[in-house]
Image: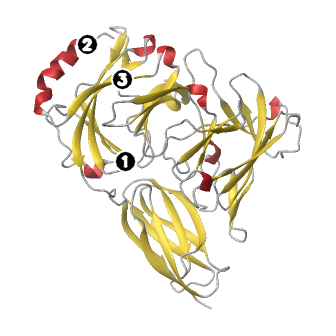
Amino acid sequence: MRIPLLLFGLIAVASSLNAQQFREVTCGPNYTLSTYFKFGNQESISLEHNAWDIAFTAQGLQDAGIFLNEAAGLEGTELELFLIPGAEFADNIDLTQLGERLLNDETNWTSGGAFNQMRDPGNPLDYGWGQYDPATQSVEGQALFVLKLRNETFKKLEISSLDGTTYHFRYANLNGSDEQSHTLNKADFPDNDLVYWSFSSNAVVDFIPKAGDWDLLFTRYSTPLDDNEGSTLNYLLTGTLSGPGVEVAQVDGIDPATITFEGYEDSLSTDLDIIGHDWKNFDLGTFSWALPADRVYFVKAANGEVWKLFFVDFEGSSTGNIVFQETNMGVVNTVNHTLFEDISVFPNPARESATIALTLKQAAPVQLNVFNATGQSVWSAVSEEPAGFQTVSIPVSHLPAGTYWLQVQTPGTAPISQPLIIAP
């Protein structure tokens, strides 16, 4: 590949930084590939976009996120997901019934999937595609979807339930023919944060890198942008998403050669698109890609190791090649900083319901669990919460009187536990 003059200038100052090296990854000509990258590893894994279609979260008992593979090359066909309002799986569906198109929101790998977008943020029992039933301790499906596959055929799809650790789902042609019913048990994938499914093979895809094996994903994804007419439109762009358990901070207006991580610990975010697509922009004056010369990203991996990332070159659709400098800044700690400023529970003791009041430094999914005295989970939910003071109601009328433990956690942080007493 062509090495830009800027790269030679950076090599001249490389000896002044700690454990740095230049890396090249690719999204392929016409952006046909998604590439999984891990810092410090001399290899990256590139896969065709059609390697998988949807992904189920498998991070614990409480998560129920389901993601759509939005990636497609410049000449490829996107996988599209639509909600079918008021319809049931037994119904014959026609294309006039297609409702809202659903996309991942690129906020987190827990509940930010396209299938979760209809959820009520104020209801911790609502997962979008389904509603948690405390009586059965399962998520019951409440929505019908239609998928437009990459071969431009259509399937109706229902996520029937998440019963314990097992997803139940089925799909068929719009007229009901060629029905397929499947189950996917999280317990069968203890090392995966996400389990990937392909509709072309009607099976789990087992060659996607597992949790901990990748930090960044260079891919294509849909994101809303200003259309210069007062509205926003979703565009499919080449960008960079952070992996499960990874935090990122963007720092501008600095000297990339001398900037250190000190002072930026509280700028880290769990949002997936902090790096995103705007680390490059197309200059119409020079008709070439331009990269900010005064911007770096600090990336904190799940193991606590922090890396400085500085983009050097982007060759666009001709090759899809991306060059950046990675610098190992060392291990900060093994547990990510907490996002909570304050947590309290009232009333305590409680009878019908309890309220947890919390203050978050930044928006994040909050995982809530209630355990009985034997350590068994008796209630759980994930609630998307904005920054600032928030309250979440916890139903407890179905629980026998006694002492319980409420556990609160955000992705990548240590759980915080408080006693919760249920009155007779």
Q: How many marks?
A: 3
- Residue topped by disc 1: 269
Is the residue 129 above or below the residue 179 in the image? below
Mark 1, secondary structure of its residue: loop
- Residue topped by disc 3: 280
Q: Amino acid at mark 1?
A: Ser
Looking at the image, the residue that sits furthest to the bottom is 424
Residue drawn at x 81%, y 35% as measured from the top left: 97
The quarter of the rendered structure image containing the N terminus is: top left
Is the residue 340 above or below the residue 74 in the image? below
Marks 1 and 3, how far apart in space?
20 Å
Is the residue 102 above or below the residue 218 in the image? below
Residue drawn at x 32%, y 58% as measured from the top left: 337
Residue 284 drawn at (x, y percent): 38, 11
Left or right: where does residue 36 sit relative to residue 113?
left
- Which mark is on residue 4? 2
First in sequence: mark 3 vs mark 2 = 2
Mark 3, secondary structure of its residue: loop
First in sequence: mark 1 vs mark 2 = 2
Give the camera-side residue of 358 and 372: 372
Residue 374: name its quadrant.
Answer: bottom right
Q: Residues within 10 Å of mark 3 (few under 14, many from 20)?
A: some
Q: Amino acid at mark 3?
A: Lys
Question: Which numbered disc, 3 or 2, marks the residue closer to the eye?
Answer: 2
